[in-house]
Amino acid sequence: MNRLGKEKSPYLLQHKDNPVHWNAFNEEAFKAAKEQDKPLLISIGYATCHWCHVMERESFEDHTVADFLNKYFIPVKIDREELPDVDAIYMKSAQAMQSGGGWPLNVFCTPELKPFFAGTYFPKHQFMMVLRQLASKWTSSRNDIETVSAEVQRALESFNTMYSRDQTEQDEEGNPAGEVGKKGTRLFGKIMKHAASSFDNQYGGFGKPPKFPPSGELKVLLRIARRTGSKQPLAMVEKTLECMARGGLYDHLGGGFARYSTDNKWLIPHFEKMLYDNASLAQVYTEAYQMTKNEMYKSVAVETLDYILKVMEHPEGGYYNGEDADSEGEEGKFYVWTKKEIESLLLPEEAEIFCRVYGVTDKGNFEHHTTHLSLQNPYTWEEKQNPILKAASVKLHAVRERKIHPLKDDKILTGWNGLMIHSMALAARVFNETKYLESAEKAVSFIRKNLWKDGKLLRRYRDGEAKFEGTHDDYAYFEHGLLELYLTDFNPEWLTWIKELQAIQDEFFWDKTDGGYFYTPSDTQLPLIVRVKELFDEARPNSNSVTALCLLKLYHITYNEEYLKRAEQIFKACGNLVEKVPQGFGQLLIALDYYTDKAKQLGVILPPSNNNNLVEVKNDLGKLWKLFAPNSVIIAGSDQSEVPLLAGKHAINQETTYYLCEGTTCRAPTNNLENILESLSDANQYQLQS
């Protein structure tokens, strides 16, 4: 029988009526495999995965496939977003067997959970062929299967030892490879060289389709531009940001970005919208606005975050996972239009300008002569404010809202929420928008109430249930978001919690032998065949690198040198890999940029008459926050504060007083904000080299 009906995952519930006798990932399934001497099919996907839906329709809803699966295998379904640690192991297994990567991921394992065959999407006829061959081999060639599974196990274990081996190598200049922090700016030259060689000069972005939004790489390039004065990295950032926003990757009616573009023009996306993509893109557009003051970037960031508030926010706080690409069984149907449809819904003048500006034609640019909207040349972003065009957009958005919507994956994941909390808090500061601050604070309160149990983070909340132990992603992303919130509202409760989260990471995730944080805690209850360590960026920033940046900022807030030492140990754990493939370590290079810069700490002491009221200094803080000074921490409070950065400092002349420090050395306090603005913008300049 199918046992998914009582699960909470939207993905598992999508499969609850399949004729396949699905199990969740649990001891009951593993016991059945051992007792019946059957291999496991571990099938992994997520609720908004288009090809997961396709394989379900073709194979898992088919009774012939189901009957064979049920007879010869123990089928297990996993939502990769609920159990990313399990997914990571089996994805590495697939890669070790040269089966590629992606979802749906179908891995065949022994009853001891050791993989021996893997693949992604299979058409029905091919899937049946695979099932028959594996069922036959299970009975006739068991030794061969055990040999393969042993080889895969060794490969999985070698992923972690690869990092430790790499630390002992020497770099091009004969220095220990692990001393990443001492290599300094040469690594930025390497990633700059890689970016320039793969940059699409016509449409922005890097490499060939499918093109994913390169948020991490763009943030690194912004920092390179800031510290070198070079125009090239900023030009690549601006070209990419403009083309992504003008294209169909961006939702011109509702705001927010799709997962990736299927073409080099950013025109036709894979239509699913993910929380983490929109968090990362909101951050990079906000930072680009800080650096350039280009109002287009502010508009894109604001519209993206407003989409999250309207569509993706839980009523009690926190943010949902994503929206599907499909509706009514068709990918993109919710988002595309025919010209006749638009002409029937708008006034003639509105239809004419809308179709002209957004490229709507009789022929269309998508399936069935439909058009997916993109801003046409030579129209500028400001054209969107044309009253006639704006009225047309409002009408069409209202019509679209009455359509059948794509599935919304309404899980709330702690880590992904941390990414969006970061974006909301950053935007609240830069754009002086209270609604974003309130949303971030509400999300943090929701997580504290629902996903913080017995001094540990849980991973997933849905429909009243909090479940699954937090992974390192959850701790790192949430700590980073909470730190960004603390640097916005200066609530000392957040700093206390941040330090507690960091202590948990150090106790339960740290690799005492080779350094770096494991993905799963040492006290995990999951039956994992190996404990993996993730150091590369993937679709989201690497959690080790996120924690490294948190540690550096914590050091400058608390002056606790243990935080600095631990960050340096993470740099070392990455070894020579950073130099070999710098493009895989964008988030680490952001932390390294902080480490090698004149990182500044600004204590803003409020006068006693202020009664710690931040409203009165909000304008001054706003001027500071509009600067692109990513390698700094700014904290405001009274002279009674116990935060080390503020402790022992006093207001001078009964006025707001600024204490600017670099490391543990502070300049003379001043009441002159203009001097501080100039000094905070100062960076440790370098010249690019590779």
Image (tube, grey):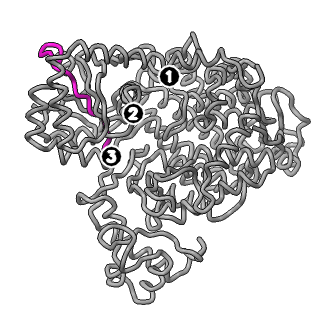
Q: Is residue 297 above or below residue 136?
A: below
Q: Is residue 138 magenta?
A: no
Task: Provide the residue designation for mark 2.
Answer: 450
Q: Report if residue 36 lies within the magenta region.
A: yes
**In front of the other: 637 or 86:** 86
Q: Amino acid at mark 1?
A: Lys
Image height of 66 relative to 284, above or below: above
Cα–Cα span, label 2 and label 3:
27 Å
**What's the amino acid at mark 2?**
Asn
Q: Residue furthest right?
A: 668
Image marks 1 and 3: residues in contact by CB distance under 8 Å: no
Instruction: Point out the frontmost of discs 2 and 3.
Output: 3
Write down the residue under mark 1. Answer: 533
Graded by Cα atoms within 10 Å as few (under 14), some (14 to 19) or many (20 or more), the crowding at tag 1 reads many
Q: Position of residue 112 (x, y in %)?
A: 26, 14
What distance separates the C-alpha of mark 1 from that of mark 2? 27 Å
